[in-house]
Amino acid sequence: MSPAPAEVLKIVLDILDDNKAEEVQTIDLKGKTSIADAMVVSSGRSHRHVGALADYVVQALKEAGLSQVRVEGVPACDWVLVDAGDVIVHIFRPEVRLFYNLEKMWTAARPDDRLAG
């Protein structure tokens, strides 16, 4: 049996914390998109750290019973995406994270939200 989305998020956050990921931010995606319930954005200090963080996250999720974990970006390790279904994890090198600035894109108010407020 696969873990619930809240449990997946907790596993991800615990692993990132235990392995010294930097600037970990969780973005609630409920009501913004149907692709996932949450997005986690974090940084690693180097290519090696980014790759190791992704490996630890994937291993912990598989041990928890999540079989359909997809990973992209491992060869370069500038930006690794771990797709755990209801939780999407981005692990960046700091300068790459700054360039893409996903937090700004996903936390900005939607046009309908701005009009209603």
Image: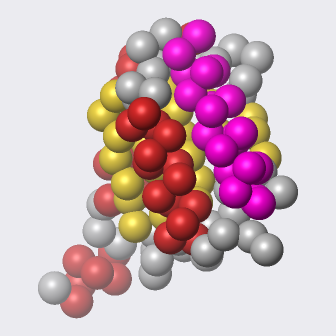
Which residue lies at the image location 61% right of the left edge and 74% below the top edge?
A: 4
Q: Quadrant of the image for the C terminus? A: bottom left
The one of 60 and 82 positioned closer to us in this rendering: 60
In the rendered view, does 82 fall on the left or right side of 27? right
How is the protein colored in the picture? secondary structure
Relative to 35, say whether 18 is above or below. Answer: above
Which residue lies at the image location 46% right of the left edge and 81% below the top edge?
A: 31
In the rendered view, does 63 fall on the left or right side of 40? right
Q: Quadrant of the image for the N terminus? A: bottom right
Does the magenta segment cover residue 55?
yes
The one of 54 and 39 positioned closer to us in this rendering: 54
The one of 65 and 37 positioned closer to us in this rendering: 65
Quadrant of res 22: top left
Judge whether residue 105 can be spotted in this image.
Answer: no
Q: Which residues are magenta?
A: 48-66
- Residue 71 drawn at (x, y percent): 75, 39
Relative to 117, say whether 49 is above or below. Answer: above
In the rendered view, does 112 fall on the left or right side of 7? left
- Residue 89 drawn at (x, y percent): 56, 46
- Residue 78 drawn at (x, y percent): 58, 19
Which residue lies at the image location 76% right of the left edge and 59% below the top edge?
A: 66
Main SS, magenta residues: helix
